[in-house]
Image (cartoon, rainbow, N blue to C red):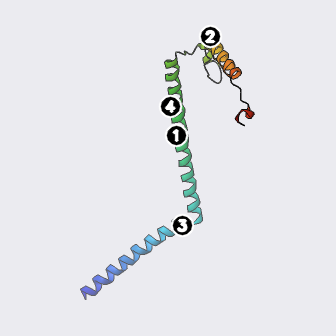
Amino acid sequence: MFRRAFWFTAGAAAGVWATTKVNRQLKKLTPESLAAQAADKALEAGHRLKDFALDVKAGMSQREDELNDALGLRRSDEDAARPDNVTALPGPRRLRAIQNDKTTHSKLSYNRNEDH
């Protein structure tokens, strides 16, 4: 008698547990629940993307400062006030670079008929 009562109770408890488990899974698969889960994942992905972009921007700024220090380019107060925060090359270097650029283009000429 006790054996039958034990197995009946164990079977009923297993049935209740399985039914509860299945109902929870079915509630997770309703369209409303799936939409809410998708929205939560999209928000989470957006926050991760924003954090990544901020990290990249900070790294770019740090590397730019390192390169400016290595090249001897110091930011003046006038350059810091510019909206694009681009530091300009000093005058003599800029002119030298432009002069070299013009001389190399004038010396080099490409004639398509030379190869034939």
Which of pointers 2 and 4 lies earlier in the amino acid sequence?
4
Q: Name which quarter of the figure residue 1 lies in.
A: bottom left
Foreground tag (2 vs 4): 2
Q: Identify residue type, mark 1.
A: Phe
Q: Identify residue type, mark 3.
A: Leu
Q: Position of residue 71 (x, y in %)?
A: 52, 18
Q: CA distance from mark 1 to mark 3?
A: 32 Å
Which of pointers 3 and 2 lies earlier in the amino acid sequence?
3
| Extreme-left residue of the structure | 2
Secondary element under disc 1, as helix, strand or loop, is: helix
- Above-or-below relation of 37 to 83: below
The residue at 74%/34% (across/down) is: 112
Q: Position of residue 21 (x, y in %)?
A: 43, 70
Q: Position of residue 91 (x, y in %)?
A: 64, 11
Q: CA distance from mark 3 to mark 2?
A: 69 Å
Left or right: residue 55 versus residue 86 is: left
Which of pointers 2 and 1 lies earlier in the amino acid sequence?
1
Foreground tag (3 vs 2): 2
Q: Identify residue type, mark 2.
A: Pro
Foreground tag (1 vs 4): 4
- Above-or-below relation of 30 to 3: above
Q: Which residue corresponds to mark 4?
A: 59
Q: Which residue corresponds to mark 1?
A: 52
